[in-house]
Image (tube, helix red, strand yellow):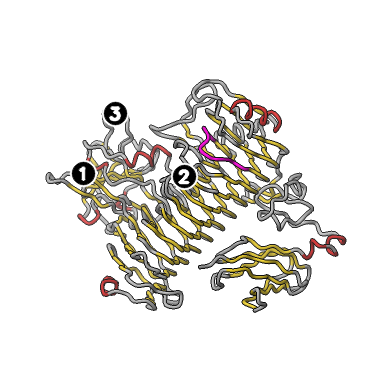
């Protein structure tokens, strides 16, 4: 493969990778020419085979017990994996890279005391030490290290590259780049990255799999027209405490083993200028930064980002879209067992549209040597709070964003797991409609330090705030002063928010405070039971819920099929179909009800030329219709059985 890439790859080339492990790294692909959709460069797995590009090392070393502590084992590894940040136990547990072997004079967790409550390892150059919570003997275990910092760097040179990757697995690229001074002492480190795209355009990553890398896929400089779909991303750092992963960035000069441990990575990281990006149908598990880690830069921006139909689990932040962005749409995602569902630090420009997402099991976490939750009596917890939405941690930017939340479902059962934990306003406005904010902890909302914040501009209508302790919101007017206001209902929350912020634009109205009656929380089914009082209680919002099935939309992320009566069968509801997103640039979803037969939908141009057809089954259904092969313009979708016609706007380049 190295020889192939070095010789250059021309437009129209397809590289078929046979199954097996390819031990490769530090590859560079320079793309010098403008390709086209008809002449792409393709890297694809051979049919029914699994090519694996790996930077892993599974050498079995002899470990010996250290004098004075029989639970710590040590060995000397070969120089190729010195300072690696990956030690994977039995293919499933990523050990924590402690920065100290023994406790120092200052309070800082070490391998000896396993101070973060995590099994771990310590390394200084080629000397490695191993200790687990259950005192395992590494000689009887399977350990995998990383000996490669990079798999491949792709430099697109700002051309129309049309590069496609499909069906390839990437594993174990997690060895940081270490620099040393003239005294052979470490003085710097740089993160490992499996794939780096620089100045690339028209990239598709489809059905690829990434396992236990640091930066997994990084898009730097200016990248546009990127599609990442049907991929899986797996790592084992997402359950670390906030202090544990934040302190991996600390390099302690007196201990060389503290370098090269930084773990605060994301499955996908986009630079400040990533335009026309689609992230869909992916599964992500076990990262700190979650699905998309954008640049924190508030004064530059990305444009047109769609993040939808993804499943994100057991991360710290579920989906990050931090920094400047214009027209970011986050919809139909499920984020579970994360401490932060959605992160919008330094959110700028906007707007950000967040709709039809389910964020459940928002988690509090035990913390270490870091910030802790301070309750209304100024008692410090050993834990850090969880929040469905993170909008703080930085000052208000020069171009704050509108935040639009429509038809989302938030759920937390932890004491300090909040649907929203917000500080002072960093946004232009928060618009909240038809959402469910469900909490079995202290409260659904905790608003901290918002006294006289006249730019707060929080507007909620037709939302359901449910808390089984009858506290839908807590406001602490001034952070650190032990005085909190607790609100049991919509009216008191509305009055308190307006009085404390002094912002008359703040409104909480027309909401509910009843149990939504989810179908099954133990089975993670957050659709509404047929007896839920939230059915048909939402407000109609054109473009967001045109496809509602009853007399009005339901509140929350899901829409229940109606109980169809004879009158409804003969009326307009039985014939209704909807299309989303509209406008669209790659794929549309057609939702409809058909009682008996299959349904066919045809797409026509304005001149009446039939472009494509899709067919779906009976009952309540949703079918996908690819439209990325159509040029930009207005088209019509025709339902064959009824003749009903609906216009759509396609925005393809």
Which residue is rendered at x = 23% and y = 45% of the image?
188
* Nearer to us in this view, 299 or 10: 299
- Residue at which label 2 appears: 316
- Residue at which label 3 appears: 106
Res 262 label: none
Q: Is residue 49 above or below residue 279?
A: below
Few, some or many residues within 10 Å of mark 2 (<14, 14–19, 20+): many
Which residue is rendered at x = 32% and y = 70% of the image?
32
Disc with the residue nearer the chain's start (2 vs 3): 3
Res 187 label: 1
Residue 2 visible to an observer of this rendering: yes
- Foreground mark, 1 or 2? 1
Using the numbered discs, state the Cα–Cα distance from disc 1 to disc 3 in whole angstroms. 22 Å
* Nearer to us in this view, 298 or 3: 298
Q: Secondary structure at mark 3?
A: loop
Which residue is rendered at x = 72% and y = 47% of the image?
538
Q: Which residue, as the protein is rendered here, is positioned at the far right?
A: 567
Residue interval drawn in magenta = 422-431
Using the numbered discs, state the Cα–Cα distance from disc 2 to disc 3 in whole angstroms. 27 Å
Q: Is residue 640 above or below residue 106?
A: below
Image coords of residue 197 (percent x, y): 36, 61
């Amino acid at each position: 493969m190295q020889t192939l890439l070095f010789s250059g790859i021309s437009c129209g080339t397809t590289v078929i990778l046979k199954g097996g492990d390819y031990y490769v790294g530090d590859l560079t692909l320079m793309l010098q020419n403008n390709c086209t959709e008809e002449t792409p460069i393709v890297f694809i797995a051979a049919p029914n085979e699994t090519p694996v590009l790996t930077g892993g090392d599974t050498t079995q070393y002899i470990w010996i017990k250290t004098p004075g502590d029989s639970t710590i084992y040590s060995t000397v590894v070969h120089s190729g994996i010195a300072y690696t940040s990956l030690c994977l136990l039995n293919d499933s547990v990523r050990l924590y890279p402690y920065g100290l072997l023994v406790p120092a004079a200052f309070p800082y967790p070490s391998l000896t005391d396993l101070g973060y409550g995590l099994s771990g390892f310590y390394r200084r150059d080629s000397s490695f030490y191993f200790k687990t919570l259950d005192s395992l003997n590494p000689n009887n275990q399977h350990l995998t290290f990383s000996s490669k910092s990079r798999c491949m760097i792709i430099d697109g040179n700002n051309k129309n590259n049309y590069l496609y990757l499909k069906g390839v697995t990437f594993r174990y690229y997690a060895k940081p780049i270490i620099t040393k001074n003239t005294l052979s002492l470490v003085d710097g480190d740089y993160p490992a990255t499996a794939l780096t795209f620089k100045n690339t355009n028209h990239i598709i990553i489809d059905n690829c799999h990434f396992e236990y890398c640091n930066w997994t896929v990084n898009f730097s400089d200016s990248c546009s027209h990127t599609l990442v779909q049907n991929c899986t991303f797996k790592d084992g750092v997402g359950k670390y405490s906030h202090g544990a992963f934040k302190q991996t960035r600390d390099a302690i000069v007196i201990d060389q083993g503290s370098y090269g441990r930084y773990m605060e990575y994301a499955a996908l990281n986009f630079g400040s200028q990533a335009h026309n990006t689609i992230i869909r149908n992916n599964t992500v598990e076990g990262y700190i930064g979650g699905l998309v880690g954008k640049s924190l830069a508030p004064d530059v921006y990305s444009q047109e980002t769609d993040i939808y139909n993804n499943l994100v689990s057991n991360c710290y932040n579920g989906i990050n879209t931090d920094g400047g962005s214009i027209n970011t749409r986050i919809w139909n995602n499920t984020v579970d067992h994360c401490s932060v569902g959605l992160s919008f630090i330094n959110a700028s420009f906007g707007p950000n549209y967040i709709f039809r997402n389910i964020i459940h099991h928002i988690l509090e976490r035990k913390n270490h040597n870091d910030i802790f939750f301070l309750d209304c009596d100024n008692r410090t917890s050993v834990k850090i709070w969880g929040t469905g939405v993170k909008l703080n941690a930085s000052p208000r930017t020069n171009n704050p964003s509108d935040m639009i939340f429509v038809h989302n479902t938030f759920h937390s059962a932890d004491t300090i797991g909040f649907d929203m934990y917000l500080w002072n306003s960093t946004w232009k406005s928060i618009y909240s409609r038809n959402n469910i904010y469900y909490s079995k902890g202290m409260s659904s909302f905790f608003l901290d330090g918002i006294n006289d914040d006249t730019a707060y501009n929080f507007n909620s209508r037709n939302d359901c705030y449910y808390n089984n302790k009858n506290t839908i919101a807590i406001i602490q007017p001034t952070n650190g002063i032990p005085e909190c206001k607790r609100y049991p209902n919509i009216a008191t929350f509305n009055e308190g928010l307006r009085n404390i912020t002094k912002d008359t634009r703040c409104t909480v109205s027309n909401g509910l405070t009843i149990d939504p009656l989810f179908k099954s929380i133990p089975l993670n089914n957050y659709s509404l039971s047929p007896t839920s009082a939230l059915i048909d209680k939402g407000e109609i919002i054109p473009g967001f819920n045109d496809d509602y099935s009853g007399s009005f939309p339901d509140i929350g992320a899901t829409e229940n099929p109606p109980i169809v009566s004879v009158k409804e069968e003969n009326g307009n509801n039985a014939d209704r179909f909807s299309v989303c997103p509209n406008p669209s640039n790659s794929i549309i979803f057609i939702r409809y009800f058909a009682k008996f037969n299959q349904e066919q939908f045809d797409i026509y141009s304005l001149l009446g030329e039939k472009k494509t057809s899709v067919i779906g089954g009976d009952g309540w259904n949703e079918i996908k219709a690819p439209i990325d092969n159509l040029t930009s313009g207005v088209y019509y979708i025709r339902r064959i059985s009824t003749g009903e016609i609906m216009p759509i706007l396609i925005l393809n380049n």
